[in-house]
Image: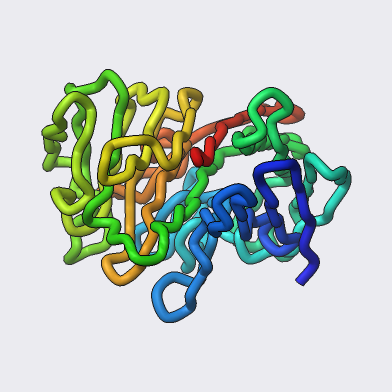
């Protein structure tokens, strides 16, 4: 597997051609790996890119107008495709994925997806992730896109002792997954009970928090003493999810445009929650940053 290394005095970052996936963030100062190791016995990913779907579609089938298409896997197909590296230096790497006859069998649009990972010049502990989605076809294109990075809890510590922090927010509401169906129970909305923006991980619900249109600018993973471990700035995104496998020593912070279908959804692709669209020839640029605190 081809891998590209970005490096400065504090961080050594590895990005794979496979899925353009962020695969390692090694903290040179603390000598710790900060990204989940993709242990296949627990969760075999590090930080997959979710495109052109986030989550699942009911029955593995979705409709564009009156025509049905099959999308059996969750989170689209980009995470399992080989991207082309189109530019790279010590401080950034850019990957590209384009539509093919194979992808158009399950997703009929012509597209180009550019993914850039870069180390911030001003704050060397910040990693910036840029996505550029382009409609290269002749008709309106619908899509979802999201991130799914898993951040490692240090060896000898428990994620149950960590906090999720929403700075300055005590008014958040979320929905979650119906564990019987695997889709979103949108009719059940919960209020997140925080203390000055903090909530302990052990107090979370069994599966996933999904914040729909809550205008979350910043979210953090905080240590047991409430000092920051990870800060994600994701203000461009309408949705945010927080998820962790109970058996894994990681927590995922997931900025999304789009998500899984609501229970009982029978509409077309353009009616999905937070579904994005591009006119022919149009491009959308999206970015977020992650700071790895010492």
From the top left corner, tell me how far across and down residue 142 is, in percent: 56, 39
Number of numbered tags placed on the structure image: 0
Identify which residue, 225 or 254, lies in the foreground. 225
Quadrant the N terminus occupies: bottom right
The residue positioned 47% from the left and 36% from the top of the image is 257
Residue 193 shows in this picture: yes
* Quarter where residue 226 is shown: top left
From the top left corner, tell me how far across and down residue 182 is, in percent: 27, 62
Residue 101 shows in this picture: no
The residue positioned 22% from the left and 33% from the top of the image is 198
Image vertical order of residue 282 relative to residue 12, above or below: above
From the top left corner, tell me how far across and down residue 75 is, in percent: 49, 57
* Quarter where residue 187 is shown: top left
Q: How is the image coloured?
A: rainbow
In the image, farthest residue toward the top: 168
The answer to whether residue 224 is left or right of residue 131 is left
Identify which residue, 236 or 230, lies in the foreground. 230
In the image, farthest residue toward the bottom: 41
């Amino acid at each position: 597997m081809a891998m590209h290394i970005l490096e400065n005095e504090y961080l050594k970052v590895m990005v794979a051609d496979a899925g353009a996936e962020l695969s390692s963030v090694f903290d040179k100062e603390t000598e710790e790996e900060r990204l989940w190791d993709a242990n296949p016995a627990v969760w075999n990913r590090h930080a997959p890119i979710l495109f052109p779907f986030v989550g699942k579609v009911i029955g593995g089938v979705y409709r564009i107008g009156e025509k049905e298409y099959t999308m059996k896997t969750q989170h689209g197909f980009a995470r399992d495709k080989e991207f082309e590296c189109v530019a790279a230096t010590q401080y950034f790497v850019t990957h590209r994925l384009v539509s093919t006859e194979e992808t158009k069998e399950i997703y009929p649009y012509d597209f180009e997806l550019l993914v850039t990972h870069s180390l911030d010049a001003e704050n060397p502990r910040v990693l910036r992730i840029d996505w550029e989605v382009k409609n290269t076809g002749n008709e309106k294109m619908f899509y979802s896109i999201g991130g799914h990075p898993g951040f490692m809890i240090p060896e000898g510590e428990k994620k149950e002792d960590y906090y999720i922090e929403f700075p300055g927010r005590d008014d958040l509401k979320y929905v979650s997954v119906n564990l019987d169906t695997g889709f979103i129970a949108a009719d059940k909305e919960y209020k997140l009970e925080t203390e000055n923006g903090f909530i302990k991980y052990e107090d979370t619900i069994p599966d996933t928090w999904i914040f729909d249109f809550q205008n979350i600018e910043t979210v953090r993973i905080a240590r047991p003493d409430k000092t920051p471990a990870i800060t994600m700035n994701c203000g461009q995104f309408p949705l945010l999810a927080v998820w962790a496998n109970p058996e894994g020593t990681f927590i995922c912070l997931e900025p999304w445009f789009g998500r899984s279908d609501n229970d009982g959804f029978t509409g077309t692709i353009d009616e999905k929650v937070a579904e994005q669209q591009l006119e022919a020839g149009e491009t959308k640029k999206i970015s977020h940053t992650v700071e790895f605190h010492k």
